[in-house]
Amino acid sequence: MGRKSNIVRQHTFRDILEDIRNSANATKQQKLPHYYIITEGQTEKWYLIHLRNADRLKFTFPDPISVNGGDYLTKIAEEIDKQSAIPRSKIICIFDVDRFHNSQAEFVNYQKFVEKYKVVNIFNNMPSVEYWFLLHFMSKPISKFFSKTELLGELTKFKPFENKSEQELKSDTFLAQVNWFNVLCGNSFVNLTKAINFAKIIARTTSNNRMDKVKAPTGCTVSYSDMYKLFDLK
């Protein structure tokens, strides 16, 4: 029998690079499955992009699709139906529900949408996503009903939204900048953590008064946000 070789294969620089590449790919795989996100407007879209860039979510996703203006439920439904290769349980829809409050016809359309896409992750804001932002600055969870005008009046008392018009707040020029997101979330994301906790408390205490639970739109007498649910998805 021949003697066993004592030669040990050296770990070359190329081997090290390959190990790093494999490790990176494994990390990406751990973050899957990714989600497909459809939003009503630019505010939600840019907020989500900033969240992703800050690595605050446990899942990956391509840039959200934003459907602006008009009959957005129909536009969102069309986007959902386009994604036939993606399981509906991996689709997230985020939109405001204030417009259904004063229209029985639109409320009925909303109910039909929720029923048709009940497997989809439907996250609502009442009256709008700005209520989620306001939770970052509150000292306690407040679920009182805000009209959109009242809500913007409260939100614009705080930096980075201070003294800004609604048009400015919803512009790409403002939203694409990461500074407003950083100020909103606070140092070490302390404001974001508070908003998540407050939204969960409000969800428990207002569950019967949500727009998707009441029999008539005026039965929704509280403000709430489902945005906290993003942080539980994996």
Image: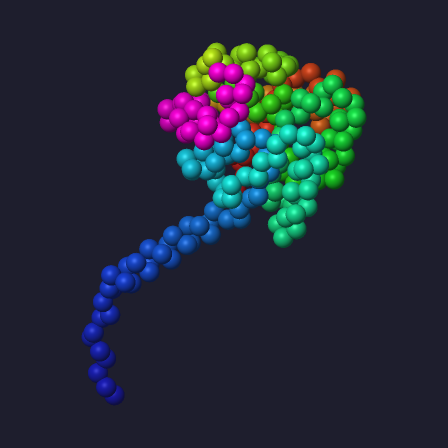
Residue placed most toward the observer, 65 or 93:
65
Left or right of 120, for residue 17: left
171 inside magenta stretch: yes
Residue 89: quadrant of the picture: top right
Location of residue 196 with respect to 151 vertically, above or below: below
> Bounds of the magenta span?
164-193
Left or right of 165, for residue 215: right
Residue 21: quadrant of the picture: bottom left
Return the x and y of residue 31 as percentages of the image width and height.
47, 47
Residue placed most toward the observer, 182 or 199:
182
Can residue 125 be seen in this snapshot? Answer: yes
Quadrant for the N terminus in the image: bottom left
Return the x and y of residue 122 as percentages of the image width and height.
64, 35
Return the x and y of residue 81 as percentages of the image width and height.
68, 46
Residue drawn at 45 percent across, 31 percent down: 176
Residue placed most toward the observer, 202 or 13:
13
